Amino acid sequence: MQISNGVRKIPFGTITITEDSKDLIMQILDSKRVSSGRYVREFEEKFAELTGNREAVAVSSGTDADALALAVLYDFGAKRGDEIIIPALSFSATGNAVLHAGFKPVFVDIEKETLNIDPLKIEEKITERTRAIMPVHLMGKPAKMDEIRKIAKKYNLYVVSDAAEAHGAIYKGKNVGALSDLSAYSLYLAHLISSIEGGIITTNNPDFAEILRSLRTHGRACKCKTCVLNMQSGFCPKRFQDGQDIRFIFERVGFSSKMNELEAAVGLGNLKIYNDILEKRRKNLLTLMKSFEKFEPYLTTVREEKDEKIGPHAFPFIVKEEASFDRNQLAAHLEKNGIETRNLFSSMPTQCKGFSFLGYKLGDFPNAEYAGNNGLHIGVHQDINKEDIDYIIKTVEQFL
Ligand SMILES: Cc1ncc(COP(=O)(O)O)c(C=O)c1O
C-alpha cells in the first residue's frame, strides 16, 4: 500500500472498480437508463450461479438484504413480533434488520473458538413464536450449519443466513450461501464482491425470490424477474390484469430498496475478477492466521477446520485475559503505524445502547461480551501485499 510521511498505510477496506465497469458506467449514464434494469438482472444471475443458488435478488444494502430475507416469512405464516434467533456478537446491522422487518431479535451467545452462534445454546431460546434461526458467518467463518439446520428441522423453523461477510466461504464443500433457505450478503465496499453500496439475497426457492422482488419495490403485485418497465420499450404487457394496474396493487408491507444500474456495473466488474480477489484475500488471511500463532500467549484468533474455507472478509483477533495490555492500547499502536483497525463489534443486546429496550443485562452473553471488549479486526483485502503483511506482523511483534 502507499507510504505517506514515511508511514505505510494499510486501510481496513478497499474496492476495485475495473476498466470494464468504468466503460459500462459511462454507457449507462449516456443511456439515462440508470435505475434498476438489465445490468442489475445480469448481476443477480451471475451472483446466483457463483453461490450455487437458483435465484438472487439485489437490494440497496446488506442490512436491507437481511430485513427483506426475513420479511419473506410473513407470506409463510409468520406474524409481526415473532422471534428470530441471532448471535449476540455481530455488526449491529443484524439486530437492526430483525427489528426493521418487524420481528423480535432473541440473542444467543457465541462460541469463543468460532465467534459464531453456539448451536448448543439455541434450543433453550426457542419458543412458540420462534420463526427462524439467523446465523451470521462472522468474518467469513462458516457457522455450524449442520447443527443449526438439524435444530431448525426439529422445530420447523427457517434458516436465514446473514452472509454479509461470507463471500467465498465454503462449508463441507458447499458455498455457505447455498445452505440456508435464504442468505443475505452485503456488497458494501469493504466486502469481497462490492457494488459500492448494495446487498443481495440468494435462495433456491423461486417463490421466495418472487416475494423478494415485490418487497424491494414497496410490496407491489408487480414482481417480474425482468421488469420491462425498465427496458427500452417502456411498455409492460403484464401491467393491466383483470382491468387493474398491478403496479399500484400493494400486496405486502414493502421496502424501497432497489439496486441501480451503476452499482450493478461495479458488481459485474467485481464478479469478472472474483477468483483473483478471492485468491489474494485468502493468501493474506491464511498468512496472518499462521503468523499470529506465535502471538498465542497474548492473542487468539479463529482456526480454519479441514472441512471449511473461511471467506476472507477480514482478520479477527482477541486480546487474551492473561495479556498485560488491553485492546485499545494495541489498536492505538497499530493505528499510529498506519494499520487501520476495527473493534470486533460488541454484544448487541448488552453492549449496544440501541438494543437496551429489550431488557438484557451485562453478563448474559459472556463470550460475545469478551470479544466485544477485547477483539479487533484488520483488513486482508486485495490491495494488501506481502510487504504489508510482513509489516503488520512486525508492528504487532514490536508492541508485544
Ligand atoms: C454481519 C453483517 N451484517 C450486516 C451488515 C450490513 O451490511 P451493509 O453495511 O451493506 O448494510 C454488515 C456490514 O458489513 C455485516 O458485517
Image (cartoon, helix red, strand yellow):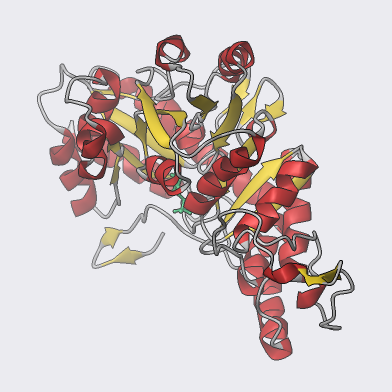
In depth, the one of 22 and 212 nearer the eye is 212
In depth, the one of 255 and 175 nearer the eye is 255
Residue 294 placement (x, y as % from top left): 32, 21
Q: Which residue lies furthest to the right in this view?
A: 237
**Residue at 79%, 70% in the rendered image:** 244
Quadrant of residue 208 within the rendered picture = top right
Residue 167 in sight in this render: no
Residue 377 placement (x, y as % from top left): 34, 40
Residue 303 in sight in this render: yes
Counting every numbered tag in the picture gives 0
In depth, the one of 334 and 207 nearer the eye is 207
Please give left or right for residue 7 compared with residue 118 in the image. Answer: left
In depth, the one of 259 and 210 nearer the eye is 210
Quadrant of residue 366 within the rendered picture = top left
Residue 75 placement (x, y as % from top left): 65, 41
**Residue at 37%, 21% in the rendered image:** 110
Q: Is residue 233 above or below residue 193?
A: below
Residue 179 placement (x, y as % from top left): 67, 28
Q: Which residue lies furthest to the bottom in this view?
A: 30
Quadrant of residue 273 within the rendered picture = bottom right
Please give left or right for residue 121 compared with residue 361 in the image. Answer: right
Quadrant (top left/top right/bottom left/bottom right) for the C terminus? top left
Quadrant (top left/top right/bottom left/bottom right) for the N terminus? bottom left
Q: Residue furthest left?
A: 324
